[in-house]
Amino acid sequence: MRISVLTLLADSQGTSPVDAYVRDVRAARDQGFSRVWTVQLPREHDVLTTLAVAAREVEGIGLATGVQPVQARHPMVLAQAALTLNLIAGGRSRSASGSPTSSSATACGGSRGTVRSAA
């Protein structure tokens, strides 16, 4: 059975957030997790760059993002960054892009919209 864990970039405990993230990924691998999922929240450093550093530093675990907001970056730029991350990670990364929740969009300076689901 494969088990993943979700973590945040802001959990740095006073050290460099990138170093803390690498430490957390290494600990997750050592505890037997198969993948670490990380979301991009407003006002945090770039998750794709941080995952790229972790991919070079820690082998043997998958790295993934939550939905990357397209309001902050053009989708083509996001796709290029995700491709580069996957090359650095040797195929161990997963990434998605799309519209964030209304609270995230508002925090990024967007307008609060209505979410509708398809039938």
Image: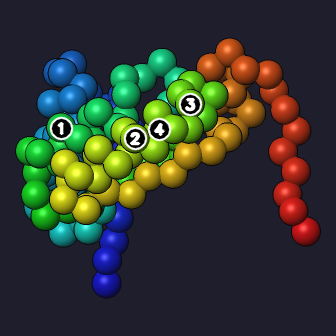
92 or 4: nearer the viewer = 92
Residue contact at pointers 4 and 2, CB within 8 angstroms = yes
Disc 3 residue crowd, few under 14, some 14–19, many 20+, Cα 10 Å: few
Q: Earlier in the sequence, mark 3 or mark 1?
A: 1
User: How is the rendered protein coloured?
Assistant: rainbow
Q: Position of residue 73 (x, y in %)?
A: 53, 28
Count the labels in the image: 4
Q: Determine which of the numbered discs, if any, sits on residue 74 in the image.
A: 3
| Residue beneath disc 2 | 80
Q: Name the N-terminal-most of marks 2 and 3.
A: 3
Residue 84, how many percent across, how many down? 29, 44
Residue 31 visible in this rendered orientation of the protein:
no
Q: Amino acid at mark 2?
A: Gln
- Three-letter code, disc 3: His
Q: Residue at x 69, y 27 (%)?
A: 105
- Comparing 6 with 90, the one in front is 90
Label 3 to label 1, Cα distance in Å?
22 Å
Left or right: residue 7 compared with residue 91: right
Residues at marks 3 and 4 touching, judged by CB atoms closer than 8 Å: yes
Q: Which mark is residue 53?
A: 1
User: What label does residue 78 carry, if any?
Assistant: 4
**Element under label 3?**
loop
Of discs 1 and 2, which sits in the foreground?
A: 2
Type of residue at label 4? Leu
Direction top: furthest residue: 109
The amino acid on which the numbered mark 1 sits, given as a three-letter code, is: Val
Mark 4 is surrounded, within 10 Å at the Cα level, by few (under 14), some (14 to 19) or many (20 or more) other residues, namely some
Q: Secondary structure at mark 4?
A: helix
